[in-house]
């Protein structure tokens, strides 16, 4: 792929679902945390200071999702948090883990093809198919269901899935990585057994996340060798990363207050794109979805071509998940929704955040205009 000569300072960044800018208060917290060099498991003063910083962050992350601090397990990110839940909530064979076909790859890696729950044309879980699967599988079953899709932004009916799960004695793990900063999160209201979070999706640092368990719930450790994280995750805690996560969590209310403005930007971009290219398709349009996310297909122009042209113009977007080693291929999410492969290969994801302005909408549309004209020719 061609490299842009545009500096990061002048970049029109529209890829918040991949990662977010680090918040100023997070950067300050990291600098302060670098001075707490003690091991949080040590009993001397330096260790106690580090432990105090970790526990303060744990309280903040718990408060962000209305959870209990003692039920927050810090991990290396959302991927590890998902793995910990899917391998630790039930200690039976992987055939008892089922997941929607549009889950993130970090979830699908733990599920066999026979455990995929189909979705409708908008990527929303098929509740009838889920109930049939629950009827046929021996307990305990663990259902993996994301809160919001990272590619289309569509929101899943978590409450309805939890109701079915309880009817059949199943557990529910919810990948909520895309939630913070975009929607209010409440693990108690969701009713799920666990949720996964990732700090760098909400203004924190890469390399730190959390699994939050419902009150009274527990999980068997996947990483062994130490008693850290209440024996749920071995290994010395990443103190600066965890402190940064706490700072991001404390800023959550302020970031969430930008959600309505951010949605207006997204809506303006979609309206402008459709005005230029009426044949373009916006996936899950009209369905409940994250207010910051637009997944747009431009038939006849490949995702790769669009990304290169936009990148050269200093506009950063993506094609599907950012966790695919830089490869651009047809999205498994869109394919699971029944989108033809050629159409899926023409889709890009635009995701806004708190630093975006109307100027970013204009810059995207200006850079995308020649692509829309080529598609119409």
Image: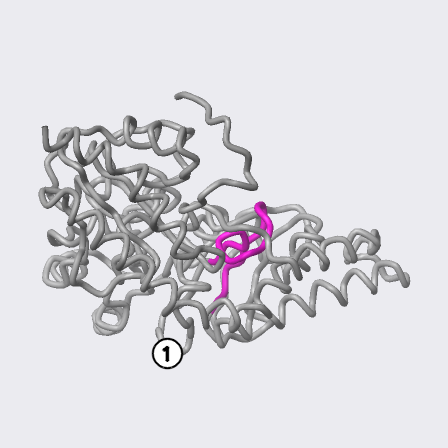
**Residue 142 in the image: x percent, y percent?**
32, 58
Read off the magenta span. Answer: 197-213
Q: What's the colour scheme?
A: one colour
* Position above or below: 195 against 294: below
Instruction: Estimate the x, y position of residue 354 in percent, counting from the top left.
Output: 47, 60
- The answer to whether residue 171 is above or below residue 97 is below
Q: Quadrant of residue 312?
A: top left
At x 42%, y 71%, the residue is 185
Q: Residue at x 69, y 70 (%)?
A: 56
Point out residue 365 in the picture as x, y percentages from the top left corner: 29, 44
Residue plotted at (90% across, 63% down): 45
Q: Is residue 190 left or right of 59 when viewed as pictured?
A: left
Q: Quadrant of residue 366?
A: top left
Reply above or below: 346 against 272: above
Quarter that holds the N terminus: top left
User: What x and y, as percent, mark residue 167?
Assistant: 21, 73
**Tag 1 residue:** 189
* Towards the viewer: 17 or 158: 17
Mark 1: few, some, or many residues within 10 Å (few <14, many ≥20)?
few
Left or right? Give the position of 104 relative to 47.
Answer: left
Residue closest to the far top: 2
Element marked by disc 1: helix
Q: Which of 90 and 285 is in front in this view?
A: 285
Q: In this view, does 184 lie to the left or right of 129?
A: right
């Amino acid at each position: 792929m061609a490299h842009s000569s545009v500096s990061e300072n002048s970049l029109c960044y529209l890829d918040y679902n991949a990662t977010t800018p680090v918040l100023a208060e997070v950067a300050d917290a990291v600098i302060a945390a670098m001075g707490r060099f003690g091991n949080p498991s040590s009993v001397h003063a330096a260790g106690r200071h580090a432990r105090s910083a970790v526990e303060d962050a744990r309280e903040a992350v718990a408060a962000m999702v209305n959870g209990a601090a003692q039920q927050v397990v810090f991990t290396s990110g959302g991927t590890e948090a998902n793995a910990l839940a899917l391998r630790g909530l039930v200690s039976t064979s992987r055939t008892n883990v089922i997941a929607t076909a549009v889950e993130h790859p970090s979830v699908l890696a733990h599920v066999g093809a026979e455990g995929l729950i189909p979705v409708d044309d908008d990527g929303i879980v098929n509740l009838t198919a889920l109930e049939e699967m629950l009827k046929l599988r021996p307990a305990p079953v663990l259902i993996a269901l994301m809160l919001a899709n990272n590619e289309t932004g569509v929101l899943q009916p978590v409450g309805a899935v939890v109701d079915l799960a309880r009817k059949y004695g199943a557990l529910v793990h919810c990948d909520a990585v895309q939630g913070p900063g975009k929607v209010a999160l409440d693990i108690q209201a969701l009713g799920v057994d666990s949720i996964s979070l990732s700090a760098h999706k909400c203004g924190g640092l890469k390399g730190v996340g959390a699994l939050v368990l419902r009150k009274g719930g527990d999980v068997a450790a996947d990483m062994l060798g130490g008693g850290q994280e209440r024996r749920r995750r071995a290994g010395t805690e990443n103190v600066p990363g965890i402190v940064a996560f706490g700072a991001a969590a404390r800023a959550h209310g302020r970031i969430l207050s930008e959600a309505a403005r951010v949605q207006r930007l997204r809506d303006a971009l979609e309206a402008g794109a459709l005005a230029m290219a009426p044949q373009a398709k916006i996936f899950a349009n009209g369905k409940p979805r994250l207010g910051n996310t637009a997944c747009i297909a431009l038939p006849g122009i490949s995702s790769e071509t669009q990304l290169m042209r936009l990148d050269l113009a200093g506009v950063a977007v993506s094609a599907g998940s950012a966790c695919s080693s830089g490869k651009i291929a047809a999205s498994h999410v869109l394919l699971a929704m029944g989108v033809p492969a050629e159409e899926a290969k023409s889709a890009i994801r635009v995701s806004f955040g708190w630093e975006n302005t109307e100027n970013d909408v204009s810059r995207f549309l200006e850079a995308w205009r020649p692509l829309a004209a080529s598609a119409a020719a």
